[in-house]
Each structure stands twice: as C-alpha cells, then as structure tokens.
Image (spheres, rainbow, N blue to C red):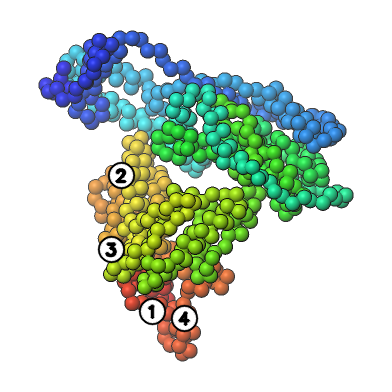
C-alpha cells in the first residue's frame, strides 16, 4: 500500500507475518507527509494493568479532625515508658493511629489520560477528519478538517493556559512551575520503573539493597574511642527550640521509614513539641539513639540514560525527620551522642512500590543527615601531600593534585607517582579505595616537543591521560582554551531550546516564556562565565547565537534585530559578573585576595590621575591576557 502519495516508501519486514492482520494506513501525524501504518497482531494482547499507589487524601476537614485529635491526645504513656526505645515506639504508635483514623491510606490507580486541552469537540473533529481520510483520501475536504482540528487544539491550549495557569505565576509560583515541568516531562511521574536485567520486578529492591550494602559492610567498622560515663544530666533542648525546628520543616519534603509526613510535624508543632522535646532530652541523657531514627529508605536514581545493571543506579537516602531534628540539636554537643547515632544504622530500598528487607549499615554516615557533611569533612581533613610544592584541592569526595615539573627532568620525575602512592596509602589507612577508573591525568605543557612523562598508577590501575578534563562542571583543556567548555554549554543550552518550543506551541505568552528561558536555559550558558570572560569574539558570538534563537522562539519573530534588545547580552552580563567578583576579591578576608594587584598609587608611591586604577599583571602571552584576572582588572579600570 502507498505510504507517501502513490509511492511505497515505508516497508515492514518480518518472518512472522501470519501472526499479524493486514496493515492499514491512516492520516499523517503533524507536518509529516508519510501516512501512519497500523499493524495489529492476530492475538489479542492484554492491556497492562494500571499501577496502584498508596497515598493519604489530605483535605481541610481531615486536617481539622487530626488537629482535634492532637489537642486531646494523652501523651502520658510516652512519658511513663521506661526506655527510650519504648518511648519512641509508643509515640509513633499514637501518631500512626491518629493518621490512620483521620487521614487513612487509600489506593490510587495511575494510567495514561488525555491531555489537559482535549475536549469532546476536539475528539469529534478528529473522528470526522479520520473518517473523511479513510473514505476519500487527501482531498480538499480532508485538508479543511485537518486545519480545523489544528486551530481547535491551538485555541484550547491558549484558552486553558490563560484561564487556569497564567494567573498562578504570581499567585502560586510552585503550581505554575509544576505545570511547566509537567509539560516538559521533567517531573517524577515521567521517571521509568526501576528494572534490572533478568531480575523479576518484585526482587529488584532486594538485589539493589544487597548491592548498595556491599559498599558499607567492612569488617573493621566503628573503631570509636570509648566515652567515659557521666552522672550529669543536662537538657539538650527546650520546648521552644524544638517548636522552632519543627515549624521550619519543609512540608513538601518526603519523610523517612517512620511514615510521619513533614507537614504533620510542622503544622501541629504546638501540640507535638513538648513530647518530642522529652524524647530528644531522654535520648541525649541516656546516650541511646532510638533505632527508628537510624533507618533509611533508599530511592534508586539512574546514573545512565538506559540503566540495566546494579552499577547503573545511585542510592538516595530518605531518613527520619525527627532523627535530623535531633542532629541539628546535637551539632554543638557531638560526643555523647555520636557513637549511638552511627551504630546500628539500617536501610532498605524502595523500588516500584516494593520494599526490600532491612540491611545493616556498618560503615559510613547516613546520606542526607545533618551531621554527615561535617563528619565527612573531618574525616577527609587528614589528607596530606608528600611534597610541599604539590597543590592539594578537595571538594567533597573529589580530590585534585597538581605540580609544576620542569621539562628537563619531567621524563625521569617520580614526584607525581609518589603523591599518588601517598594518596593510596592514606585511603587504605582510612578504609577507603581510590577509584582509578574515574581518575584522569591532564598534562599542560606549551613546549614545542612536550616530554614523555611516565604513566601514573592510582588504586592499582593506570590513570588515563586526557586532553580535556571536567572539574566541577567546567571543561579544562590542555591548551587552556575555552573551546571545549563553550561547545559543551552551547550544545546543552541548544537542547533545552526544545522546552521553549513545546511551551510556545501550548500558547504560553512571551513574558512567561522569557521567565522559562532565564531560569532553565540561560544559567546553563552562563555557568562559570567569569572564567572565560576573555573568550574570543567567535566564541562569544556562538553563545549569543543560542540566546538569539531563544528570543526568536519566544517572540515568533525571525528578525533578530527586534529580539536582541529585549534582554542584556551574555557578554555584558559576563563582564559585569567578572567586575563584581574582582570587587569581592579586593576584600582582605576573601580567600583569593592575594591574587589582586594593588592600585597604581600603592605600586609607585605617587598620586597620579589614574592612581585608583589597579595595576595590570605583567603579561607576555595571549593566554594570560585572556585570563580572568587580567580581563577583570582591565574592565574594572574602565569603570573608574
């Protein structure tokens, strides 16, 4: 059959044609000139069952009923319990009973539904258009019906946005952004199921939990020094402190395994703060961390676009909210609670609506905990270098080592390998392993004949030598040029222009499209823009071209001269940001203050007409002339 006019251009090749019905064609979709081919199987396929989720239907009436229960509840059973574990267990039993009574769980089916702009009128027009195509083909009547359908959809999209969504931008920005993200497919609902190759769906959670637990199950764990017992009893916190922390909780954040929503703790902080304060003080004075506050739900997040094996998933922890509240309270009183807080941590994986069994965490600190970043920084602060001239830079778990090696002795130099060996030894002593597969070596040399350096070994593996290395999101090239980074951000920004096209087709006005651009696209183009403030004109024009394309999409205008004046250029914003950073660096307490040169009066000792201008660094190469410090100093002097 014909798939384009009278020609057959689209073929279906199969060796099981007897399993399918005769193919049929329908009208092309969108602007395509190829007919759609429908090929139905002979065997009836069962429709996939809609997924079911459990949730609490929260209404104002149910909130009021829960508030009344909170006000009249007798907490004496919590106060009279003998141990901390019993107190916390009793507290959660009472809370869960109130929640199940006032706001019970209910099952919800989720399935694909029509778009928000779909109406009965549009459905009727679609049916008429399809019937005419099947009977008469691509006639003038069919074209009129096709154009009529497109007009109806366009008007309904614009009507729905102007009536229901446009006003939310000022009244309720969160709901407005929820609509935008839903239209762009950037919501959690669009995430795929957690799957593993050759693993049944119900066993995925257990397999992932065992895999995640392997990295946290070492033999020599928790070698903490013993703490002397104390007879002194001090209150960790007051009711007012607990009330303030509960009130400031983010009600939209997910809770941990205890199942108590954050909005309950925040909205009813007046009723809950006395009993929670009692739990916190009892736990602190007895030196016992309740087990319910040391558990975590693990949500797998894919590392790659198409995850297939266990290594392609990253664990994200959801820990108890009350456990985090206690961490904030003990931040300045660490030692009495540190050992019981770290010991006996547990986690489980939540995937596809299933929970794995609990797994003991025998090393590390809980992800998402308040104390965890501080403890990790203390743990990493013991890292040292072998040679004093080695620059040691650390950001969280990323470590960067750099050295200046003379070209004459580079081929026989072993200092960098000594640093790598020293780093390996430090990691082994602290029960860690350096990942040689994710490490790389960047060599920066401008000699005519660069020396051949010996290979580096880290973590038992040879480190890969690269010409461009990403560090904290910035692409550093071995020639110190900005082409790689600018190409990366322009490519990423160009991909996000698709967001604007989708929203523009949905009838979003130009003002709101500009907000989407300045929030989702321009920050990508301006990432670390002060570093490449001295980029070439060609590189700058490459960045500006993305903004010009965005303006043409927003204003539906192909004339670039009418759209470029609506927003400041990326170059002007880049130069302004560079001068602002240089002004901040001039402060004596700034970490980079030592890089800023003095003004000319300080350098010459004379009061000249340009005495307040900063002295430009001595420059012999074009690389230094295009660097941040030189360009920012030059721009700063022009502002005086």
Chain-order first, disc 1 or disc 3: 3
Per the image, the residue denoted by label 1 is: 618
Q: Residue at x 28, y 53 (%)?
A: 545
Per the image, the residue denoted by label 3 is: 537
Measure the C-alpha gap from mark 2 to mark 4: 46 Å
Find the residue positioned furthest to the front. Answer: 412
Relative to 484, say whether 178 is above or below. above
Residue 279: % across, % down: 78, 39
- Marks 2, 1: nearer the viewer: 1
Measure the C-alpha gap from mark 3 to mark 4: 29 Å
Residue 48: % across, % down: 43, 17
Residue at disc 3, secondary structure: helix
Q: Give the class, few, some or many, for how many residues have Cα within 10 Å of label 1's Cα (few <14, many ≥20).
A: few
**Residue 553's mark?**
2
- Marks 1, 3: nearer the viewer: 1
Which of 429 and 438 lies nearest the eye of the viewer? 429
């Amino acid at each position: 059959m014909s798939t384009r006019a009278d020609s057959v251009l689209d073929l279906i090749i199969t060796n099981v044609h007897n399993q399918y019905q005769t193919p049929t064609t329908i009208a092309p979709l969108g602007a395509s000139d190829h007919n759609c081919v429908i090929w139905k199987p002979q065997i009836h396929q069962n429709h996939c069952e809609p997924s079911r989720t459990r949730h609490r239907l929260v209404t104002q009436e149910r909130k009021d009923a829960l508030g009344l229960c909170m006000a009249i509840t007798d907490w004496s059973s919590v106060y009279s319990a003998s141990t901390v574990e019993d107190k916390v267990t009793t507290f959660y039993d009472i809370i869960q009973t109130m929640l199940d009574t006032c706001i019970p769980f209910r099952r919800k089916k989720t399935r694909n539904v029509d778009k928000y702009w779909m109406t009965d009128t549009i459905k009727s027009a679609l049916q008429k258009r399809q019937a005419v195509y099947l009977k008469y083909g691509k006639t003038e009547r069919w074209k009129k019906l096709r154009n009529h359908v497109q007009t109806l959809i366009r008007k309904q999209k614009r009507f729905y946005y102007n009536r229901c969504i446009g006003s939310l931008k000022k009244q309720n920005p969160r709901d407005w952004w929820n609509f935008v993200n839903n239209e762009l497919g950037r919501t959690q609902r669009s995430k795929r199921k957690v799957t593993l190759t050759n693993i049944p769906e119900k066993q995925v959670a257990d397999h992932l939990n065992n895999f995640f637990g392997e990295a946290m199950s070492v033999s020599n764990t928790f070698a903490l020094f013993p703490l002397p017992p104390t007879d002194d009893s001090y209150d960790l916190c007051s009711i007012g402190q607990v009330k303030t922390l509960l009130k400031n909780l983010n009600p939209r954040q997910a809770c941990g395994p205890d199942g108590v929503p954050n909005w309950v703790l925040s909205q009813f902080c007046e009723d809950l703060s006395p009993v929670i304060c009692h739990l916190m003080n009892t736990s602190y004075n007895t030196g016992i961390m309740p087990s319910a506050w040391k558990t975590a739900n693990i949500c797998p997040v894919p590392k790659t676009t198409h995850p297939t094996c266990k290594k392609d998933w990253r664990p994200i922890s959801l820990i108890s909210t009350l456990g985090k509240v206690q961490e904030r309270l003990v931040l300045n009183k660490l030692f009495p609670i540190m050992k019981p807080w770290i010991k006996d941590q547990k986690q489980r994986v939540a995937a596809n609506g299933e929970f794995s069994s609990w797994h003991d965490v025998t090393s590390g600190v809980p992800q998402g905990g308040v104390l965890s970043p501080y403890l990790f920084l203390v743990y990493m602060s013991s890292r040292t270098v072998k040679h004093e001239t080695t620059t040691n830079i650390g950001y969280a778990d990323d470590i960067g080592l750099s050295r200046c090696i003379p070209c004459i002795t580079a081929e026989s130099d072993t200092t960098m390998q000594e640093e790598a060996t020293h780093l390996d030894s430090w990691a082994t002593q602290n029960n860690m392993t350096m990942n040689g597969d994710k490490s790389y070596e960047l060599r920066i040399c401008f000699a005519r004949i660069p020396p051949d350096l010996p290979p580096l070994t880290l973590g038992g593996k040879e480190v890969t030598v690269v010409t461009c290395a990403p560090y904290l999101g910035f692409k550093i090239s071995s020639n110190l040029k900005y082409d790689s980074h600018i190409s990366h951000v322009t490519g990423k920004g160009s991909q996000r222009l698709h967001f604007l096209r989708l929203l523009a087709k949905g009838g979003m006005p130009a003002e709101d499209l500009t907000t989407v651009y300045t929030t989702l696209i321009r920050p990508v183009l301006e990432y670390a823009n002060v570093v490449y403030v001295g980029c070439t004109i060609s590189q700058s024009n490459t960045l500006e071209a993305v903004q010009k394309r965005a303006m043409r999409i927003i204003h539906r205008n192909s004339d670039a001269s009418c759209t470029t004046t609506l927003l400041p250029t990326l170059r002007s914003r880049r130069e302004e940001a560079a001068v602002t950073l240089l002004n901040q660096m001039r402060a004596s307490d700034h970490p980079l203050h030592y890089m800023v040169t003095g003004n000319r009066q300080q350098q010459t000792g004379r009061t000249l007409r340009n005495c307040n201008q900063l002295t430009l660094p001595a420059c012999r190469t074009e690389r230094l002339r295009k660097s941040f410090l030189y360009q920012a100093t030059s721009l700063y002097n022009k502002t005086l």
